[in-house]
Image: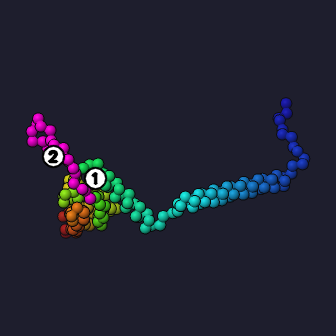
Amino acid sequence: MAPFRFPRFPNRTPGKRAFRNSLAAAAWVLVTVAAVTVGVLVSGALNAQNGLRPLNAAEVAQSLADRNNRMASEAARRSGPAPAPSTSATAPAPLPTSTPPTATSVLRSSGGTVLASCSAGVAQIVSSTAAQGFSIDEDAKPGSPKLSFESESVKLNVEVLCTGDLPRLQETAQPKTPHRDQGSDS
């Protein structure tokens, strides 16, 4: 039995097939460009109608600072002051009737960022993040008004102080001395 062969159509020449393929590819490209253009125009029109526009660098920084301040005040509001320890095992500790106002701020140093609060003149570090190239000293105590950021060349001691009920940052730098190998002396 002879193998099956597809019939040849005499009116289809390679030149016509190439032309049709090129025409189909051009049509596909044209439809794709038109769809993207319509999408961009509609998106721009909707954003303009709703008053939306890209933010510049100053607006982004202001928006992030506002968000950080809202988050910090919310965290401080949630945590509140710790209840006083009970002096007797049978009597529960009295609940505070009102909490003093707490001012929370994001403070920046060259070693990192500190979220600090002041309540009744007492400073407290709520959280901290080291800048690139720095780490936070492992001896830092939670809630303490002091901590240290360390890099290979410097140790930055940071202390939060209260001016009224507003936290401010005091930073002192201590250069690190390079360690020499004791066995390299000849």
Q: In which quarter of the image is residue 85?
A: top left
Q: Which amino acid type is marked by label 1?
A: Ala
Q: Can residue 90 be seen in this view?
A: yes
Quadrant (top left, top right, bottom left, bottom right) of the C terminus: bottom left
Q: Which of marks 1 and 2 is nearer the N terminus?
A: 1
Q: Mark 2 points at which residue?
A: 84
Number of numbered discs: 2
Write the residue at 90% across / 48% down.
11
Against 88, residue 56 (above or below) is below
- The segment highlighted magenta reads 82-103
Magenta stretch secondary structure, dominant: loop
Counting other residues with Cα less than 10 Å from the Cα at mark 1, is it few (<14), some (14-19), or many (20 or more)?
many
The residue lying toward the viewer, choosing from 44 and 93, is: 93
Write the residue at 28% across / 55% down.
127
Against 165, residue 79 (above or below) is above
Q: Is residue 178 visible?
A: no
Percent of width and height locating residue 1: 85, 30
Q: Residue 109 carries which label?
A: none
